[in-house]
Image (cartoon, rainbow, N blue to C red):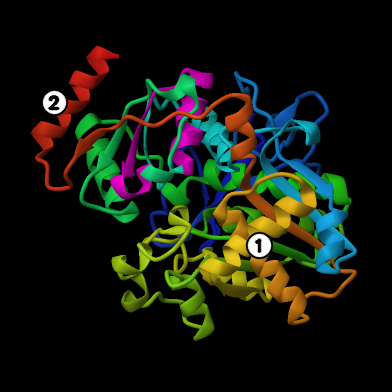
Amino acid sequence: MSHFNIRCRKCGKELQEVYCAFCEHCVGSLLVTEYSSEDPFRSDREGLWRFDWLPVHDPLFKQPGPVVFRSERFASSAGLENLYIAFNGYWPERGGKIESCTFKEFEAAAVLQNAKENGVEGLIVASAGNTARAFSHLSVISGFPVIIVVPKMCLLEMWYLESSLAIPTIAIEDGDYADSIDMAKRIARIMDMPFEGGVKNIAKRDGLGAVLLEAVSVMRQLPDHYFQAVGSGTGAIGVWEMAERVLRTGKYGSHMTRLHLAQNLPFAPMVKAWESRSSELSPNDLRPELISEITTRVLSNRYPAYSVQGGVYDALKSTGGMMYGIENDEVIEAMDLFEKAEGIDIVPASGVAVAALLRATKEDKVKRNDKILLNITGGGEVRLKKDKGRHVVEPIFISKYISDENIEGIICDHLKKS
Ligand SMILES: [Zn+2]
């Protein structure tokens, strides 16, 4: 018997055997997982799989989990007494074993295991960088085939682990992250392999929500505040849904965690929409030319899960949440401050979250002794480079105007060769 059901957030209908879909009556409303156990932790498994609230039954490979610790040095420099850091990356001294250096590894592990258990034989994944590295790594670890699509503009900041270099990766020469998503959907249709589903994939959200479960196991309660930088918003939605499940058990406090989400200016469509309390993004804030001006290309999604029912807008509204627009120089400053205090490098997206926390502290949006969870969604890249090396991705370049026949030919040729 399965330990979970899937339910439509809008009409409440229970669905069975659905994979990355919407409810038939409520297109535009996310499906959520409901777990039968009251206790999210299990003692018979390790790493990520020790969380029972994941839509997987029999994980066939090992996956390290998140690391959460109470900060001393950075907390005191920020004037905070109860700051907990979720570090998702490579930091051997702290137990950080995530070699792809991103929390997207939890998403990839949960998605691939869930896909396998659903009889899916391979997936097409769109990414602006981190997701590509996480999925290519997990494809090797789990033996589950994936084809990865990225925008060429993100290649400069991209790297793979050595073992992942053979994973087919396609780069769109003339497009951004949104064009990569469009192309991934086309390739999925042509190759008859499903698209990973983006925010619609419950395994993706629940895998990312594991960060909150680790925090609850360390803090023994729900945090008062949660800070994260958002691109698609999928991770923040996953954390919000997980916090709702934890709250329902009544065992870890009676207050919902407040979400504090941040984007890098000038490309900050969700910040702009939230400032005007609008549930719709403005096309003016989604102009592709804004993307070239930000430090954090991984946050450059023009299709974020903001307006969808159960998405970022709803998450902010229901938790009394806040959004922060962070300038490039604040990002660099925050990264530097964090590294000097904690002794580990973090990626620019994490710098956006750190800067948001510093601003919230300054503006008294959080109190000195509030219990705060800061999600460092990626870090330890410099450290990993020193210990294990990082590798340049060598993709197959295509134009977004390529014909279907040509796409099929190029991919089949590549698969034959490798
Ligand atoms: Zn429905």
The quadrant holding residue 148 is top left
Residue 132 on the magenta segment? yes
Residue at figure coordinates x 25%, y 31% from the top left: 192
Residue 296 position (above or below residue 269):
above
| Left or right position of 327 against 183 | right
The quadrant holding residue 9 is bottom right
Residue 246 position (above or below residue 143):
below
Pinpoint residue 375: horizontal percent, then vertical percent. 68, 54
* Element at label 1: helix
- N-term mark: 1 or 2: 1
Pinpoint residue 111: horizontal percent, then vertical percent. 51, 35
Question: Which residue corresponds to mark 2?
Answer: 409
* Element at label 2: helix
Q: Residues within 10 Å of mark 1 (few under 14, many from 20)?
A: many
Give the amino acid type for the residue marked by disc 2 in the picture: Gly
Q: CA distance from mark 1 to mark 2?
A: 46 Å
Question: Which residue corresponds to mark 1?
Answer: 334
Residue 147 is tagged as: none
Residue bounds of the magenta highlight = 130-155
Residue 245 in sight: no
| Left or right position of 196 against 204 | left
**Foreground pick, 245 / 7:** 245
Residue at figure coordinates x 73%, y 82% from the top left: 363
**Foreground pick, 156 / 263:** 156
Pinpoint residue 48: horizontal percent, then vertical percent. 69, 33
Give the amino acid type for the residue marked by disc 1 in the picture: Ala
Mark in front: 1 vs 2? 1
Residue 42 in sight: yes
**Foreground pick, 154 / 344:** 344
